Image: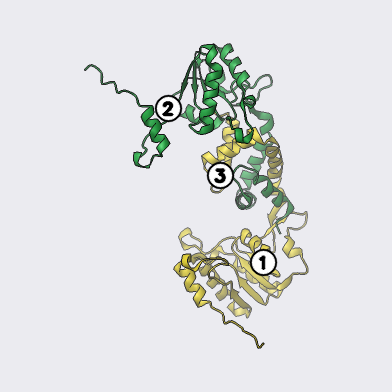
Chain colours: A yellow, B green
Amino acid sequence: MLPDRLQRLVHLLARLPGVGEKTALRYAMHLATEDGQLATQLGADLRDLATGIGKCTCCGNMAEIHQDRVLCDVCLDTRRDATVMCIVAKVQDLLAIENSGAMRGRYFVLGRLLSPLDGIGPQQLPLEALLGRIGADGVQELIIATPPSVDGEATALLIAREVESTGVRVSRIASGVPHGGDLEYADQITLGRAIDGRRSIDVGDS
Amino acid sequence: MLPDRLQRLVHLLARLPGVGEKTALRYAMHLATEDGQLATQLGADLRDLATGIGKCTCCGNMAEIHQDRVLCDVCLDTRRDATVMCIVAKVQDLLAIENSGAMRGRYFVLGRLLSPLDGIGPQQLPLEALLGRIGADGVQELIIATPPSVDGEATALLIAREVESTGVRVSRIASGVPHGGDLEYADQITLGRAIDGRRSIDVGDS
């Protein structure tokens, strides 16, 4: 009983990650009845998305496409320390690290993690491009910021081994009880890592 | 560190109901990196939405806009019993009732419910249009299918009072334990309604 045009919109919206038919219908109704301006703006922006946004050819971050090049703001920022490179699984992780303000170097987005069950082996990872970047940029320190999951740890280990021969210093981000977290509710693996990764407290000489 | 164009898309997507910045970013990344075809199709469909889809001038259901008229499939269906009218709060409720196949008459979508806290009083409800429809269509039975909530009940009562003078038979959909529901886990109000609304069992004469 829904008009074909609206039914098609519902089907399209249901292709967004984590969106089912009910949620898609809710979005479609909102766009059709309550916020027509949003529909028009979204329509215009989405239509030009594929031609306007692409992956940075250097690091894999999202970037505006200009006629001759696709480079992201991080790679274009000359104040960045190109000798430090942070490896992340996806662009969202890069954004999260950027928001923390703790990273002054550049990035490399893998796009995926090792996942034997999904058929993603070392051949499916952009290791060659990574080694190329390390050589071209004169990278001296590599910070592997893949998530502290089974796939993330396996990927970190693989990269550390691949890079070993280049003599680059390789580190892994710390894993432990998060800031403001409660030890009582932390899982066993997190607590184990927090203890394994303990750091000595420097009291100073005062 | 997100390109302006993508940042704007995230802001637009975050205006969808129940969508926050994180979810909007997830949608935007999916559209930008994984399903470019979806972005283009969605873009085209959304751009034409405001000019192609409108509210049925008769009942308020969603309908394709044709040059001279905006009428939904239900109102255009001549096999429908125009003397029975079902009143619903929103289009999604109409669709749910249509899917049940239990309604052979036509509809009237209120678009909102009485809600004094949100400043929605009787003046904000389309009561005049409703009375007009009842007279024009020769409606003999009115089924009020507003939700069994405080606002829904208040709205049902208001409509029943407004319509009283027309002599139309007015009923309210049943409220009780849902099909397959467990009495043990039903709330007190639902159980109270189930008992208040009990129906005698007809054993027949066999």
The residue at which mark 2 appears reads as: B174
Contact flag, marks 3 and 1 (Cβ < 8 Å): no
Residue A188 marker: none
Q: Do circles 2 and 1 both sit on a common chain?
A: no
Q: Position of residue A19 (x, y in %)?
A: 54, 45
Q: Using the image, determine if residue A55 lies above or below residue B176.
A: below
| First along the sequence among labels 3 and 1 | 3
Three-letter amino acid code at the position of disc 1: Tyr
Which percent across, then down, holds residue A90?
Answer: 60, 60
Q: Which residue is mark 1?
A: A107
Give the residue type that dot 3 points to. Answer: Arg
In x, y percent, where is residue B3? Answer: 72, 55
> In the figure, is residue B138 to the left or right of A167?
left
| Residue A15 - label | 3
Q: Is residue B191 left or right of residue B26?
A: left
- The residue mark sitting in front, 2 or 1, is 2
The answer to whether residue A149 shows anywhere in this view is yes
Q: Chain of mark 1?
A: A
Q: Residue at x 64, y 85 (%)?
A: A204
